[in-house]
Image: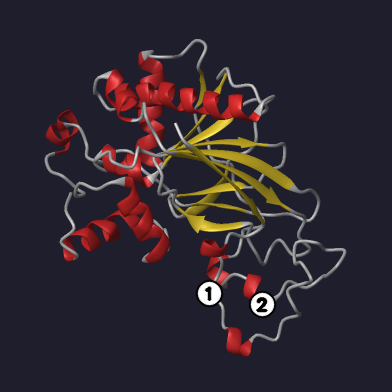
């Protein structure tokens, strides 16, 4: 199972606001906007439009907390996951059995945990518990380490802009600093850190595997002026030659296919080179595949 490891700091380039470089009068970029002791004003290219600036008071999002030591495969766990994933795609897991002492062991443990979660997702969708586990048994996944430094003007900028994860499943370990926000019912809501709990969310690729039943929602990372924030994210992705399509049981339940067959490299190329990830990425991708006559 190959795992790619990448690191990020502050805003990711693909999730930055649009820039007007011809009229940019901001200070040179060697003054880091996320280091308030060096600069008190954020350069213009890091300031988000008013409609996308972070809120001062963001209510907490109520997400289910699943204990994997006692709730695995129970009807209650399946119900909680189904309710969360059909609405916003986020839930928390504790007693997951993952140690953070050795990085490679951590990566292997996260892959194993993601397969266990796939069993729960399958049960929640009414398919054989082994179906999605088998689909992702061999996978091409990504581990990312994030660092969000202090920011002098956190009300003007974002650590990571609004986006949906194009991958299948994200398992996030937050430190003690709040920063993750999810757009639910047109309102940004915070998912507060809980010690020893991982945040799990559905990505666009699994949304396609569920034929649109489970949702991949917009989320972002905000910054603050008091404390730096760090997180580790594990992104589960299908093996490159796997064809992404929902199982027949789900198609029979929903009535028709919402998305064409595709592979993970096709979708990744679309999100990297043709489209900024947002709430309609999958629909736009489906149209792109059809327009380019690029079926599997």
Q: Residue at x 81, y 51 (%)?
A: 226
- The Cα–Cα distance between marks 2 and 1, rounded to whole angstroms, is 10 Å
Q: Which residue is mark 1?
A: 18
Report the colour scheme: secondary structure
Q: Residue at x 22, y 61 (%)?
A: 287
Compared across the picture, whether 78 is left or right of 128 comes to right
Proximity of marks 2 and 1: CB atoms separated by less than 8 Å: no
Give the residue at x 42% y 38%.
140
Inspect this view and state whether residue 280 appears. Answer: no
Q: Classify mark 2: helix, strand or loop.
A: helix
Q: Which residue is mark 2?
A: 44
| Depth check, front residue: 256 or 147 | 147
Q: Considering the image in quadrants, where does the N terminus appear?
A: top left
Q: Residue at x 75, y 61 (%)?
A: 34
- Image quadrant where residue 24 sits: bottom right
168 lies left or right of 146: left
Q: Is residue 94 left or right of residue 77?
A: right
Measured from the top left, where is residue 125 in percent x and y? Answer: 28, 28
Where in the figure is residue 93, as x and y percent of width and height?
53, 25
């Amino acid at each position: 199972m190959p795992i790619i490891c990448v690191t990020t700091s502050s805003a990711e380039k693909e999730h930055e606001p649009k820039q007007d470089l011809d009229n940019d009068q901001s200070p040179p970029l060697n003054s880091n906007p996320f280091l308030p002791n060096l600069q008190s004003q954020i350069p213009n290219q890091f300031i988000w439009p008013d409609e996308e600036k972070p809120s001062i008071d963001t209510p907490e999002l109520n997400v289910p907390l699943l204990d994997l030591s006692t709730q695995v495969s129970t009807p209650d766990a399946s119900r909680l996951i189904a309710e969360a994933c059909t609405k916003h795609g986020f839930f928390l897991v504790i007693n997951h059995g993952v140690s953070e002492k050795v990085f490679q062991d951590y990566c292997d443990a996260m892959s194993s945990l993601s397969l266990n979660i796939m069993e729960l997702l399958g049960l929640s969708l009414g398919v054989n518990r082994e179906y999605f586990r088998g689909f992702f048994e061999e996978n091409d996944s990504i581990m990312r380490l994030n660092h969000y430094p202090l920011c002098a003007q956190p009300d003007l900028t974002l650590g990571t802009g609004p986006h949906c994860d194009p991958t299948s499943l994200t398992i996030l370990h937050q430190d003690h600093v709040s920063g993750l926000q999810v757009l639910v019912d047109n309102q940004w809501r915070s998912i507060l850190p809980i010690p020893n709990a991982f945040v799990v969310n559905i990505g666009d690729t699994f949304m396609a595997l569920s034929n649109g039943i489970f949702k991949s929602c917009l989320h972002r990372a905000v910054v603050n002026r008091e404390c730096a924030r760090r997180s580790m994210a594990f992104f589960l992705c299908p093996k490159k030659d796997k064809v992404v399509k929902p199982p027949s049981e789900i198609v029979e339940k929903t009535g028709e296919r919402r998305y064409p067959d595709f592979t993970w490299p096709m979708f990744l190329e679309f999100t990297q080179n043709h489209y900024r990830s947002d709430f309609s990425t999958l629909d736009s991708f489906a149209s792109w595949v059809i327009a380019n006559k690029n079926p599997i």
